Amino acid sequence: MKYRNHLKSLLHYFPSNIQTETTISSLAVILNCSERHVKTILKSLHEQGDIQWVIQRGRGKKPLLTIILTEEQLLFEEAKELVSSGKYRKAFEIAKSLKSLQNEFNQWMEADLGIVHEKDENVEQDILRYSFYETKLCMDPIKAVSRHDGHMIQQIFDRLVEYDPERNVLLPRLARSWESGDGRIWIFYLQKGVPFHHGREMTSEDVKQSIKRIPSNNIIVKSIKEIATPSPYTIVFYLNEVDYLFPRYFSNSKASIVPIEVILEDEKKFQKFPIGTGPYRLTVHDDDLVRLDVFKNYYRERPWLDRVEIIKTANSAREVNHPLMLKAPDDSWEEIREIEEGADYITFNCSRSLMKDIRFRKRLSEIINPVEFCIEGEIVASSFLSNRSLELNEKKFIAATKMIPIDNTLKIAAQEIREGVNHEREAIILQNQLKRAGIDSTIEIVKSSELSKPKIISSFDLVVGGIALSDDHLLSVLTATVSNHLPICPSMSKEIHKKVDNFMTRIKLLQDESSRWKLYFEMEDYLKSEYQIIFLNHRTHTIYQHKDSEYANIELDHHGRVDYRRVWKRHKARINS
């Protein structure tokens, strides 16, 4: 809208929708400009339909000014213009001040969300546009924390392999093939001609440097003794032990392949503006918008979506009723509730004086009632796997009646995944259950990254945490159990740790998946029998699926996430019978 600020000034002096006499000279004073420019402004505003400007004939008759827009309507139009120019944050700030027109703005905004077909400079594009609450993204694969980080990394980067959960097989990606004769030496053969987003070709040296960036205590690299690159398209891993699971580690997002020179130049910048080999490249990341554009030189099949625009809103994850949050837009979308694989849990820190005694851990476990941790739709967990929890169908909880007199105040750590997303609710439930048994406790919310530090975790008796499993369920539960970046392993006694290491060695020797699962469940049962861990609940999430969509693979989860790589549009032809 041209001359918007001048119209704002006029609204301070003239009421809306009321015809008022005035003069050019008076308006020149109000608008602080020449009388000649006032005439230009009035002509433009009149032609735009924002005002009516009537020149009255006759001596002494003054012109008549009628401002058509109210101040709120003017703000509404301003917010729309800001949205059109990509200045979403300012637009949402203005929209918040709207009273009678706020719903109208939301409806106008939502009409432009979803999958839209646009023509820009004679280029036709299919764009997925949606709004999402502000989250500080870190898109460096080895430093990512949240699911949102991981989701973006999946689109921007590729890995050597990808795990297919439907067929339970490992698929070639940046690696075209791999082999091992003894499970100790693994050779990977790379695709040729794979470009990074900045143009350089990926080589075995990039793979080597990307893997070397991963912390040495991570399961991905823990057993690697040496890495060799005999050619630009061949990389060899020499392990300290036989491990037939080894190729699967490289499907983990932390094993995404990066151009090391870009990170060495500016690591902090890379976290916000990453460069990978994936199907989408990041083109905008500011206070208003995160934008992904299709990478036209992608080495595999090109995604159908040309662009993804994620509009940032000011609301936090807890304010899920924001009118612009991605949701089922109408009755043509079906809401499906699913049990999430993974579980919330409590782990006992066996290095603490009281917790060293298994009898004390057992007595504590008898007063912890998992049912109280479940909200509507959730089920009690007996494992990280929901099917196994349902199969075990463990005996109904009977609360311990005896008090447990102790002089100490137990310290509870509630795991924090990111700001505003933590296990405080579960920690409070635990605290109340302990209180009923006569045990005092304190709660502290601790970042996940801090809980991995021995000095930090050693100061807590109990840790309340949880995980959601990745597509590769087996690798995910094994990693959760032995990773030093999660609280389970650092809480173990030396004896328990030794037994778990033995389980892991045996699992790595196996080449049959069912045998691996059988041995893992033995390990899980062992940890429960030692009262090292108590499983609490399996969470649920909502998935929206379109009943009869022209778009394939559109599936919106409760985080508003879509796998952009898989979306495409069907052609609906009319078939005459």
Image: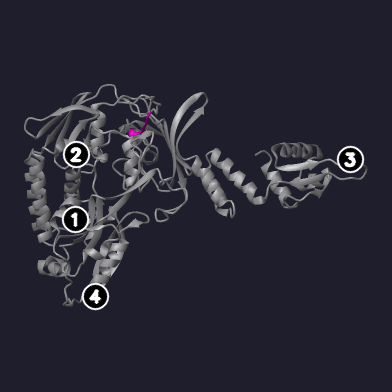
Q: Which residues are magenta?
A: 566-570
Q: Which residue is mark 3?
A: 57
Q: Which residue is mark 1?
A: 488
Sequence-first tag of 4 and 1 = 4
* Circles 3 and 1 in contact, beta carbons < 8 Å: no
Q: Which mark is residue 249?
A: 2
Q: Residue at x 7, y 30 (%)?
A: 181
Given residues 148 and 394, the one toward you in this image is 394
Q: Which residue is mark 4?
A: 436
Measured in 3D between alpha carbons, the distance from the residue under mark 4 to the one under mark 1, in whole angstroms, is: 26 Å
Given residues 220 and 168, the one toward you in this image is 168
Q: Amino acid at mark 2?
A: Tyr
**Given this view, does label 4 or label 2 mark the residue nearer the observer?**
4
Q: Is residue 459 visible?
A: no
Measured in 3D between alpha carbons, the distance from the residue under mark 2 to the one under mark 1, in whole angstroms, is: 20 Å
Q: Amino acid at mark 1?
A: Ile
* Circles 3 and 4 in contact, beta carbons < 8 Å: no
Sequence-first tag of 4 and 2 = 2
Q: Is residue 517 visible?
A: yes
Sequence-first tag of 3 and 4 = 3
**Quarter of the rendering occupied by the C terminus:** top left
Q: For the residue labelled by badge 4, is the local secondary structure a helix, a strand or a loop? A: helix
Q: Amino acid at mark 3?
A: Arg
**In the picture shown, does residue 193 fall above or below 463?**
above
> Relative to 239, is 312 on the left or the right?
right
